Amino acid sequence: MPAADPQPEILPRAEHGISRTQIDENTLKVLYRLHRNGYLAYLVGGSVRDLLLGRTPKDFDVGTDATPAQVKKLFRNCFLVGRRFRLAHICFSRNDVIEVATFRRQPALEELPEDPAEHFLLVQNQFGTPREDAFRRDFTINAMFYNIADFSIIDHVGGLEDLAARRLRVIGDPLVRFQEDPVRMLRALEFEARLDFTLDEVASAGIRECAPLISEAAPARVREEVLELFRHAVAAKVLRSAQTAGLLDPLLGGYQADQATLDLLTQLDQRTTAGTKCEEGFALAALFLSSFLQKCPATGDLQIGDVLQTANRAIGTYSNYFRIAHGIRHQARELLLGCYRLGRGRGRRGERRFLQHPATPRSLELFMLWSRVTGGEPELVDSWRDALRNREEAPQSQPKPKTQRRPRRRRSGNRRPQPNT
Ligand code: ATP
Ligand code: MG
C-alpha cells in the first residue's frame, strides 16, 4: 500500500485573523455555492497570503476539485477560458470576474516534454489534489488555502512558518523550479521587495546561477511581470537587485540601469505609492530617459527629427522584444521628446504649440521627477508649470481660417504620428 500523504498543518478559525468580512462578497458567493454542491472550495494564492499579513488583496482566486465543466454547470454567468488549461471565469460585471481553477499538479519528470520552454505549459495542464496543487506553486507563502467549509487555513508547504519569519522560500529545489519556469526568479525579487521579506539564501544563489535562462521565457509573461513591478512601486528595488544578481541583462535584452535611472525609478515608485497610477508608456520612457538625454543633451543644437529618431532607437530594442503596442511606444517617444524640450528651457521656437500639445503636462511630470534626480533647475520646472497653467486658464483662441494656405498634399501610405514639435 502506498504511504498516505503527510497531513497539512491546519490553523482553525480561532487561531488566525482572517474574517469573511475581508473577503469580497461575490468571491464568497462562489465559494459557498461550490461548497454547498459538495466540492472543495478554497481561497488560494496571493489573497490568503495578503489577508494573513493584514494587507488588502489585489484579487481573490478560488481553487476547487470541481472540473471546469462542473463549475460551468453551477453558474449561469460562467465562461470557460484558456486554450490549454481551462479556467472558469464567473462574471458578475465587466470589472468583477472571479477566477476559479481546478486543482492542478506538477507532472512527473518523465512526463515533461523535451523542450524546457514547454514545461510551464504542461505544468498548467494536469488536474491534481489540493496537496499537489500547493506543491506546484512558486513560494511557500503563496501556497496556503483558506477553506470555506470551516474557515481554517490549510498549509501543506510550511508557508505559515515562513510567513511568521518573513522569509520567502521557493517550494522544492530552487534550481529545478527556476529551470522549469525562469519567470519565478523575477517573481522572487518582486515579492522580496513588495513584502520586505528575506529571500532564502538557496534561492538567491539559484537566481545567480540560472539568471541567463530568463531570456528564454516568453516575452509576454516577462513584460507582464515587469509591469507588476511598476504597479506595485518596487521597480527601482527590483531592477537594482536583478542587476546585482545578473538577471537584468538577460531579462531586458542587454539593458543596464545606470544610477540615475535607478534614482528616477525610485522617484517614480514614490509617485505610484502616493496614488498616481504608472502607465506603461510612462514606465518605458523612465527606463530610457537617462540614456536618451545623454545622446540628446539640452545644450546641443539638434534637429527635432534627429531627436525623435534617437528617442525611437532608445526604446526600440525593448519595444520590439516585448511587442509593445504602437500607441504605447508613441506615448513613450512623446515623453522623451517632451523632456528634451523642457530641459532646453523657455522661450524656444514653437513653445506655444508645445504648450498646447496634450502630451506636455505628462512630460513635465516625468521631467519633474528627473530634475529631482539631477538636482537641477527647480525654477525651470516651476516656470514650465506656470506656463502650462496660464495656457489652461487662457481662453482658447479661435482657429484661424486656413484660406491663405495652399492645401497640403497627403502622403500616400501609412501616416506617421506627428511628433510634439
Ligand atoms: P498578486 O496578485 O498580489 O501580485 P499573487 O501571489 O496572487 O500576487 P499571481 O501572479 O496573481 O500572484 O498568481 C497567483 C498564484 O499563482 C500565486 O500566488 C502562486 O501560488 C501561483 N503562481 C503564479 N505564478 C506562478 C509561477 N510562475 N509558478 C508557480 N506558481 C505560480
Ligand atoms: Mg493574484
Image (cartoon, rainbow, N blue to C red):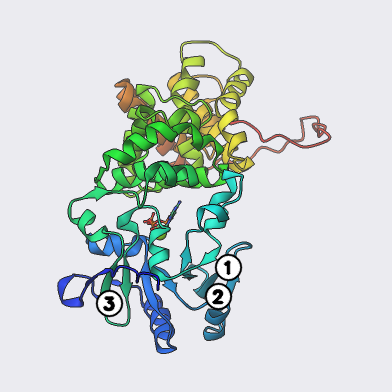
Q: Which residue is mark 2?
A: 68
Q: What amino acid is labelled 1 in the image?
A: Arg
User: Of residues 345 and 145, which is closer to you in this image?
Assistant: 145
Q: Which residue is mark 1?
A: 86
Mark 1, ligand 1, within 8 Å: the answer is no
Q: Which residue is mark 3?
A: 20
- Quick one: label 1, few (<14), some, or many (20+) residues within 10 Å? some
Rounded to the nearest whole Å, what is the CA distance between mark 2 and mark 1? 6 Å
Rounded to the nearest whole Å, what is the CA distance between mark 3 and mark 1? 28 Å
Secondary structure at badge 2 equals: helix
N-terminal label among 3 and 1: 3
Q: Are marks 2 and 3 in contact (CB under 8 Å)?
A: no
- Residue 346 visible somewhere in the drawing: no
Q: Quadrant of residue 52?
A: bottom left
On screen, residue 207 above or below 87: above
Q: What amino acid is labelled 2 in the image?
A: Pro
Seen at 30% across and 44% down, the residue is 192
Secondary structure at badge 1 equals: loop
Q: Position of residue 204 (x, y in %)?
A: 32, 37
Check the image and name the residue furthest to the left.
15
Seen at 38% across and 36% down, the residue is 207
Q: Quadrant of the C terminus?
A: top right
Q: What amino acid is labelled 3 in the image?
A: Arg
N-terminal label among 2 and 1: 2
Seen at 53% across and 47% down, the residue is 221
N-terminal label among 2 and 3: 3
Q: Are marks 2 and 1 in contact (CB under 8 Å)?
A: yes
Rounded to the nearest whole Å, what is the CA distance between mark 2 and mark 3? 25 Å
Seen at 49% across and 23% down, the residue is 341
Horizontal relation, residue 117 to residue 1: left or right: right
Horizontal relation, residue 254 to residue 308: left or right: left
